[in-house]
Amino acid sequence: MKITKKVINNIPVTILKTNKFKSVTGTIYFKSPATKKNITYRRMLRNILMESCNKYDTHEKLYINSLENYDSYYSSSAGRYGNYIINSFTFASLIDKYTKEGNLNNVINTFCEIIFNPLIKNKGFDNDTFDIIKKTYRSSLEKIKEDSSSYAERMVLKNLNQKKAYTFMSEIEYLDEITPKSLYDEYVYMMENSEVELIISGDIDENDEIISKITSRIKENKKYSNDLIIKNDDECDNLIIKSDVGYGTQNILTIVMYLKNISDFELNYVAPIYRIILGGASGARLFDTIREKYSLAYYVFARLEKDDSLMQVIMGIEKENYEKAKDLCFDVIKSMNKISEKEVREAKKTIITSLLDSQDSILNLTSRQHNANLFNLPDIDTFIGNLNKVSKTDVENFANKLKPNLCYFLKGESSNG
């Protein structure tokens, strides 16, 4: 695979040229600072843009067009990465060699229609489409309470520093204020105040006209400071213990640890190894101790939120096992200051296998490259080389920097877990 980076029409473009796949995929990213308000707006914007556009003014027409273009694929997402909200739009299409001449160009035309020519009436989104999207969005937010895992995740964030962007999430109070006009205003703001980049993967020439067809539609390209990663160095080390009663039957215990005063090398290479050893798979310390040895959890795993500088342990337990499971979890975390060479080797092997497996999906290629661009990571071979430089001592020193800062327990309504 050949990786080429260039600027086309003032837009940074990364081309991952490979003939391994029969398709071409591309994603355009719109990045701007996250706020409590725009998280809700941008996620609704993601949905309404994929529903219809000016040329294909119903979802059915848009769907028929994708079938006519040999089942082309369009999707969008709106996710927070550290201090930023990123709206992304993706297309995937068979290359013309396997369809007909001009098919890829037709797909790009539709892709541009979806993003740059939305269904607008009277300086606002179409009312009928807007009402459907808003109703669906409201329903999904109201149902979060019924999903214990999602509700526990939200409540954990409610107990962290509300000034930090990792606590920003979709809220009904912001949804209620959205109108067809205010949502369109947010769309215009996104178009005019985003840092934009494009990533194309597949058997495509770096000078292919479809690239400039996309980038030429962007009139402004902002540049934001490189403060993506949220720092927790200023957070206190006091342990907060909190519990709530949820609406479902699950009991979920979450332990949050801040990553403080760590280097880029630790964040990118040491922290993932620590996570695997702590709770990244069956055979990890948490799994072996809490689930296998003492049978206290239905599931237990560790999650690294690199852009938020957070490490979390999440487990599903029964209410009566709360104290013992909590204490054992703390013990396992403390034990991480002494690990074995074998654990480090096995963790590296797990990460490397996952990275190499990701190369078998063209969509994963694009996603991995976007993360590399965001976090200033090297190509995959160099990344693996750096990962292999991590020593047992590096992981133990990193472990000494972590300790539980929040222990949150969401108790289910019923008594049987």
Image (cartoon, rainbow, N blue to C red):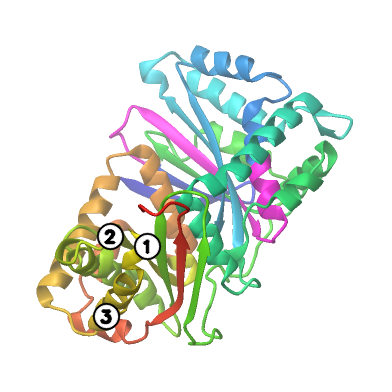
Pointer 3: residues within 10 angstroms few (<14), some, or many (20+)?
Answer: few
For this orientation, the residue located farthest to the right is 122
When the figure is inspected, residue 43 is found, relative to residue 284, above or below; the finding is above
Tell me if label 2 and label 3 are in contact, CB under 8 Å. no
Q: Magenta segment, which residues?
A: 17-45
Camera-nearest residue between 209 and 282: 282
Q: Which mark is residue 331?
A: 3
Q: Secondary structure at mark 2?
A: strand
Comparing labels 2 and 3, the label whose residue is closer to the camera: 2
Asked if residue 377 shows in the view, the reply is: no
Q: Three-letter amino acid code at disc 3?
A: Asp
Mark 1 or mark 2, which is nearer the start of the sequence?
Answer: 2
- Tell me, yes or no, whether the two marked residues, 2 and 1, touch with CB atoms within 8 Å: no
In the rendered image, residue 153 lying in the magenta stretch gets the answer no
Left or right? Give the position of 269 relative to 209.
Answer: left
Residue count near mark 1 (Cα–Cα under 10 Å), binned few <14, some 14–19, many ≥20: many
Q: Is residue 214 above or below residue 162?
A: above
Q: What residue would you read off at disc 2?
A: 297
Position of residue 53 in the picture relative to residue 304 (left or right)? right
Tell me the tag on residue 319: 1
Which badge, 2 or 3, is on the more N-terminal residue? 2
The location of residue 63, given as percent across then percent down, is 56, 18
Q: Amino acid at mark 1?
A: Lys
Find numbered disc 3 in the image and state the secondary structure of the residue it sits on.
Answer: helix
Place residue 222 in its image quadrant. bottom right
Q: Secondary structure at mark 1?
A: helix
